[in-house]
Image (cartoon, rainbow, N blue to C red):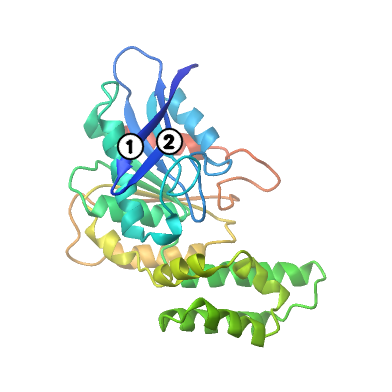
């Protein structure tokens, strides 16, 4: 095990934006065993992806694996605005981070792969499909369904929890129907003012705050642009091994439906012979691979990750 590591602030260019992050290099003789770029989830995710990446980073470094993670566009010290981007833009940023890590003399270039959490899974799948030189990709709690379907699932769970907690002023069916109307409005490219009128006309049900809180015109524009993203074409286009992690108690992602979607996609003809799929469903784990009432990764999760990287 590597007990210490060198940490470096790094900057690199992704398209028209300047991205900033942190590079961890294991202190050891010779090059790192492998390298990984960590890509955060939805919203204003920074290089630590809130609290999810630090224990992951430590484990990878202790295993002799170099790690680079970065602030999303417009977050931390990165320029740009993630709300003005597309998933393809974010995938280009992940590819730029990959090239940054590969350029380091302490890392063997062809060992560097991509790890994407939640929305970041869609991002790394898009980045990997666009290139033929990525040795492997890991998705973590990444829905196999569209953002609109995933968000509805999460909202429905949130509303059920509100009822369980005695907040009976929330009508689950009417709130979900309002969510569906907002999704349809997004498909018609309705502007933010139209969306606000829909919410106001429905009396701004309290349960919708899970989805609607903080909504403004830039975020509405981003969400309606992304809402019907289908991960299947990128899964079909992969030309490298893929490890997909899910937590069995993830309430934000429809895990069973995602597994069905993954299975249906990988069984279609025409996939590359290099594109194997390994699925790990971690018992009892949530969206961030933690057990209930803990802040640390579920037992075995991190070891499964590093063992798979070593074998691939």
Q: Is residue 98 left or right of residue 131?
A: right
Vertical relation: 220 (above or below) 188: above
Residue 93, x across and y down, in percent: 33, 47
Vertical relation: 102 (above or below) 74: above
Q: Would residue 233 be visible to someone looking at this image?
A: yes
Residue 213, x across and y down, in percent: 64, 66
Residue 190, x across and y down, in percent: 46, 82
Q: Which residue is mark 2?
A: 21
Tell me which residue sits at (42%, 49%) in the image. Answer: 73
Classify mark 2: residues with Cα within 10 Å, few (<14), some (14-19) or many (20+).
many
Q: Is residue 264 left or right of residue 140?
A: left
Q: Are marks 1 and 2 in contact (CB under 8 Å)?
A: yes
Residue 291, x across and y down, in percent: 63, 46
Q: Nearer the viewer, residue 136 or 281?
A: 136
Question: Which type of secondary structure does the marked residue at label 2 adopt?
Answer: strand
Classify mark 1: residues with Cα within 10 Å, few (<14), some (14-19) or many (20+).
some
Quote the CA–CA distance across marks 1 and 2.
9 Å
Q: Which residue is mark 1?
A: 12
Vertical relation: 60 (above or below) 214: above
Q: Nearer the viewer, residue 125 or 301?
A: 125
Query: In the orientation shown, which residue stands out farthest toward the top?
Result: 29
Q: On the image, which quarter does residue 186 sit in?
A: bottom left
Please state the total of marks drawn on the protein image: 2
Tell me which residue sits at (19%, 42%) in the image. Answer: 133
Question: Which type of secondary structure does the marked residue at label 1 adopt?
Answer: strand
Tell me which residue sits at (49%, 56%) in the image. Answer: 42
Marks 1 and 2, the one that precedes in the sequence: 1
């Amino acid at each position: 095990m590597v007990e210490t590591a060198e940490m470096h602030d790094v900057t690199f260019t992704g398209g028209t934006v300047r991205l900033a992050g942190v590079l961890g290099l294991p202190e050891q003789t010779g090059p790192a065993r492998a390298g990984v770029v960590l890509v955060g989830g939805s919203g204003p995710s920074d290089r630590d992806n809130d609290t999810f990446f630090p224990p992951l980073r430590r484990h990878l470094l202790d295993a002799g694996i170099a790690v680079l993670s970065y602030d999303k566009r417009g977050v931390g010290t990165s320029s740009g605005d993630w709300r003005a981007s597309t998933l393809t833009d974010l995938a280009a940023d992940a590819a730029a981070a990959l090239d940054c890590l590969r350029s380091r003399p302490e890392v063997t270039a062809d060992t560097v792969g991509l790890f994407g959490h939640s929305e970041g899974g869609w991002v790394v799948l898009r980045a990997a499909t666009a290139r033929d030189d990525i040795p492997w990709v890991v998705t973590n709690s990444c829905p196999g369904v569209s953002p609109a379907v995933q968000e509805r699932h999460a909202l429905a769970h949130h509303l059920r929890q509100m009822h369980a907690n005695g907040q009976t002023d929330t009508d689950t069916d009417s709130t979900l129907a309002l969510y569906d109307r907002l999704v349809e409005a997004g498909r018609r490219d309705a502007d933010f003012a139209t969306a606000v009128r829909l919410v106001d006309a429905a009396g701004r049900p309290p349960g919708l705050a899970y989805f609607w809180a903080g909504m403004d015109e830039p975020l509405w524009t981003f969400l309606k642009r992304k809402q019907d993203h289908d991960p299947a074409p990128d899964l079909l286009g992969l030309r490298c091994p893929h490890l997909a992690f899910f937590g069995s108690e993830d309430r934000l992602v429809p895990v069973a439906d995602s597994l069905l979607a993954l299975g249906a996609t990988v069984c279609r003809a025409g996939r590359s012979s290099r594109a194997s799929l390994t699925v790990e469903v971690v018992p009892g784990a949530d969206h961030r691979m933690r057990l209930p009432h803990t802040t640390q990764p579920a037992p075995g999760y991190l070891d499964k990750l590093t063992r798979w990287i070593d074998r691939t």
